């Protein structure tokens, strides 16, 4: 599908075949959180840091800059829930593929939580979104996680199941958890026909985050989607540049952060 191929070039680095994506859709879930209070500023920081793409909800696209500064890929997130809901794992659709196209999106993303009570609804909605993405030639990133009572979010079996579900649904990119183990994650990535990117995880120190990213890339991940560890960093642009060095240049974390870190 040539339309998808053209748009994927704005999301994935054409030289390395990998991507550094910064999701900034957290305000929908968590409200007015640190790092996302001045959206125009943080988008500029992310862009200057060299990230390949950002993830925004439709109402925040206006804060981006397509007329000045370094260009950056735009992925419009279609799924939403809030932390005030008794079941924040229940995601609903709040945007369509057509709306995202009108906003200038290079791709769209949706969220699925396998093991959650509303799993079947999220899968059904993903099927419809995948159909629309194929119709319009828009890349689809499926963010999919094992989340539910008694489910280990780092289990290789569960993460492998998530990746296969997303692939079966027609994802062009898949975002999921890193197992934390190179061997188990490599087996998952090698068994999938589309790029698998890892989530940034909980807020952590800079070096710890970079070491985790380095391990995931070495294990076959096609990139990272780093949210809070990037936009809540004291120096977002500098830290994102370090992430890009690890992902694209394959520099070691101690090289880009220094041993004192």
Image: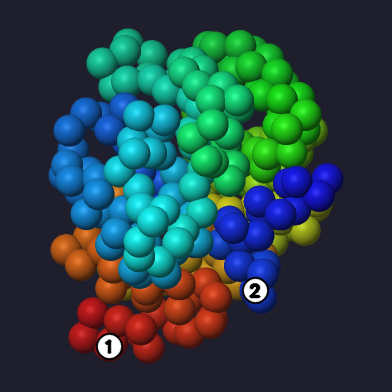
Q: Nearer the viewer, residue 60 or 130?
A: 60
Q: CA distance from mark 1 to mark 2?
A: 27 Å
Q: Position of residue 247 (x, y in %)?
A: 52, 72
Name the residue rendered at 67%, 42% in the picture.
139
Name the residue rendered at 56%, 62% in the picture.
19
Q: Position of residue 188 (x, y in %)?
A: 71, 52
Vertical placement of residue 167 versus 10, above or below: above
Q: Nearer the viewer, residue 104 or 225?
A: 104
Q: Which residue is mark 2?
A: 16
Mark 1 surroundings: few (<14), some (14-19) or many (≥20) residues within 10 A: few
Name the residue rendered at 17%, 42% in the picture.
37
Q: Is residue 227 visible?
A: no
Task: Say what secondary structure mark 1 lies in.
Answer: loop
Q: Position of residue 130 (x, y in %)?
A: 72, 28
Where on the picture, by quarter, is residue 145?
top right
Position of residue 124 in the picture relative to residue 246 (left or right): right
Mark 2 surroundings: few (<14), some (14-19) or many (≥20) residues within 10 A: few
Point out which mark residue 259 bears: 1
């Amino acid at each position: 599908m040539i339309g998808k191929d053209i748009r994927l070039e704005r999301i994935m680095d054409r030289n390395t075949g990998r991507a550094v994506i910064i999701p900034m859709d957290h305000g929908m879930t968590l409200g007015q959180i640190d790092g996302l209070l001045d959206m125009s500023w943080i988008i500029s920081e992310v862009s200057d840091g060299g990230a390949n793409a950002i993830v925004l909800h439709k109402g925040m696209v206006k804060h981006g800059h397509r007329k000045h500064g370094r260009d950056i890929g735009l992925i419009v997130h279609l799924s939403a829930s809030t932390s005030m809901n008794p079941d924040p794992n229940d995601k609903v659709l709040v945007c369509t593929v057509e709306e995202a196209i009108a906003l200038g999106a290079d791709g769209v993303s949706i969220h699925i939580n396998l093991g959650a009570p509303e799993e079947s609804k999220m899968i059904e909605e993903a099927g419809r979104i995948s159909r629309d993405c194929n119709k319009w030639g828009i890349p689809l990133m499926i963010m999919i996680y094992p989340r539910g009572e008694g489910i280990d979010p780092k289990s290789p079996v569960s993460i492998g199941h998530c990746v296969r579900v997303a692939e079966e649904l027609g994802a062009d990119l898949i975002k999921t958890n890193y197992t934390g183990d190179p061997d188990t994650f490599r087996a998952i990535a090698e068994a999938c026909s589309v790029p698998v990117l890892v989530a940034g995880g909980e807020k952590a120190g800079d070096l710890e985050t970079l070491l985790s990213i380095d391990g995931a890339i070495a294990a076959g991940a096609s990139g990272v989607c780093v949210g809070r560890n990037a936009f809540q960093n004291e120096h977002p642009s500098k830290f994102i540049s370090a992430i890009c060095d690890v992902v694209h240049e394959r520099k070691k974390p101690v090289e880009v952060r220094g041993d004192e870190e």
